[in-house]
């Protein structure tokens, strides 16, 4: 039995850069990040698809990239 939580059971939060219409949006799991230090990121258009697991530094880099190119 795996101790890794099922990503489908997590609380996912939409990016503040989202248009709010469920279109092109990145979501992340803040509770999981606080508990484990792993920053999970997924595409809101396909929530059952694979997600990315980033380090704190990787997530910060993704956010910085989105701010510049968003």
Image (spheres, rainbow, N blue to C red):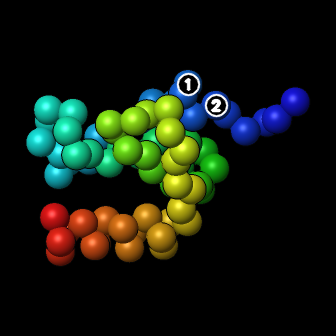
Q: Which residue lies furthest to the top in this view?
A: 9
Mark 2 surroundings: few (<14), some (14-19) or many (≥20) residues within 10 A: few
Q: Can residue 55 be spotted in the picture?
A: yes
Residue located 60% across and 45% down the image: 35
Q: Position of residue 64 (x, y in %)?
A: 28, 72
Residue located 40% across and 36% down the image: 46
Residue 18 left/right relative to 57: left
Residue located 67% across and 34% down the image: 5
Q: If the image is split into quadrants, where does the C terminus sit?
A: bottom left
Q: Where is residue 11 in the image (x, y as percent from the top left)?
A: 45, 30
In terms of image quadrants, where is residue 45?
top left
Residue located 24% across and 66% down the image: 66
In terms of image quadrants, where is residue 27?
top left
Q: Position of residue 14 (x, y in %)?
A: 29, 40
Residue 22 left/right relative to 1: left
Residue at which label 1 appears? 9
Residue at which label 2 appears? 6
Mark 2 and mark 1 in contact (Cβ < 8 Å)? yes
Q: Can residue 31 be spotted in the picture?
A: no
- Please name whichever residue, 59 or 52, is drawn nearer the observer in this view of the structure: 52
Q: Callout 2: helix, strand or loop?
A: loop
Q: Where is residue 6 in the image (x, y as percent from the top left)?
A: 64, 31
Residue 13 left/right relative to 16: right
Q: Which mark is residue 38?
A: none
Q: How many labels does the image show?
A: 2
């Amino acid at each position: 039995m795996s101790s890794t939580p099922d990503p489908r059971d997590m609380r996912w939060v939409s990016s503040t850069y989202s248009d709010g219409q469920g279109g092109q949006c990145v979501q992340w799991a803040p509770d999981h990040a606080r508990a484990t230090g792993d920053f999970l990121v997924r595409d809101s258009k396909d929530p059952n698809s694979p997600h990315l697991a980033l380090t704190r530094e990787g997530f910060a880099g993704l956010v910085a990239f989105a701010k510049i190119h968003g």
